[in-house]
Amino acid sequence: MVKIEAPLEKVLKQHKDSFCRVVTFNNRLDKILLMDFTANNKTLPPQTVNSTDSFSTYVNEQLQSAGALYGIGGYNELRTLYARSEVFDSTDEPRRLHLGIDIWGAAGTPVFTPMNGTVHSIAFNNRFGDYGATIILRHELHAVIFHTLYGHLSLASLAPLTSGQFISAGLQIATFGVPAENGYWPPHLHFQIITDMEGMLGDYPGVCKFSEKEKYLANCPDPDLILNMMQHV
């Protein structure tokens, strides 16, 4: 059966060479490491994940050992590590399927907007395991409206922004937050594309139930359509 390409995927592919970098990365000079946070990764025991300090040490050691500027990955990845937080629990089925791409790196790493947009909403989602400081931008390309979500940021990133504010392509809008600001995770950026925000402000699920996979992946296409980084792992 041939997959019918959604309008957003089509327009993003048409513009793939025009997007600005979301993080500073030179594929000729910088190395990035593909990071696996599924149950297949036997080097990451639950006790390491459950401690933010131990988890951060693990990520840093992986990057240093590989000589990598960033770790990357996670779209459509079934991750057992979300058992560390009640945020992802529910009475019928826990949420474990990741809907964004994570870019792991140092706290304070600059984050840029890949294209012109406006501020849709901001929030400090401060539960353990949540997004922490979060920015959502609204974009339009060829009459196709969509959104980009930036999670696990520094609190200072939110201060200059107001709803409806225009943000030009390539502008630095944020930095990676420290654990106390980013939902108590090792420093990283969660980057996600969202077609329909479903009325939500400052938040949208970055992890879904496996039984709802088709719905959420249709609404949240592969972030690498904008990032253009996965080809370099």
Image (cartoon, rainbow, N blue to C red):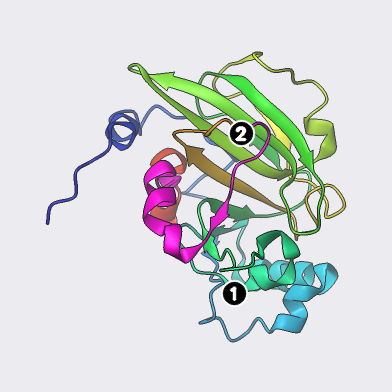
**Residue topped by disc 1:** 80
Confirm or deny contact between disc 1 and disc 2 (CB under 8 A). no
Give the residue number, with chain letter if any, for mark 2.
200
**Closest to the observer, 126 or 182:** 126
Span highlighted in magenta in the image: 200-224
Q: CA distance from mark 1 to mark 2?
A: 26 Å
In terms of secondary structure, where does tag 2 sit?
Answer: loop
Q: Earlier in the sequence, mark 1 or mark 2?
A: 1
Looking at the picture, which amino acid does disc 1 mark?
Thr
| Left or right for 88, reference 161 | left
Tell me the element at label 1: helix
For the residues carrying marks 1 and 2, which lies nearer the camera in this image?
Answer: 2
Q: How many marks?
A: 2
Kindly give the residue lying farthest to the front in the view shown. Answer: 91
The residue that appears at 78% across and 32% down in the rendered structure is 157
Q: Is residue 91 magenta?
A: no
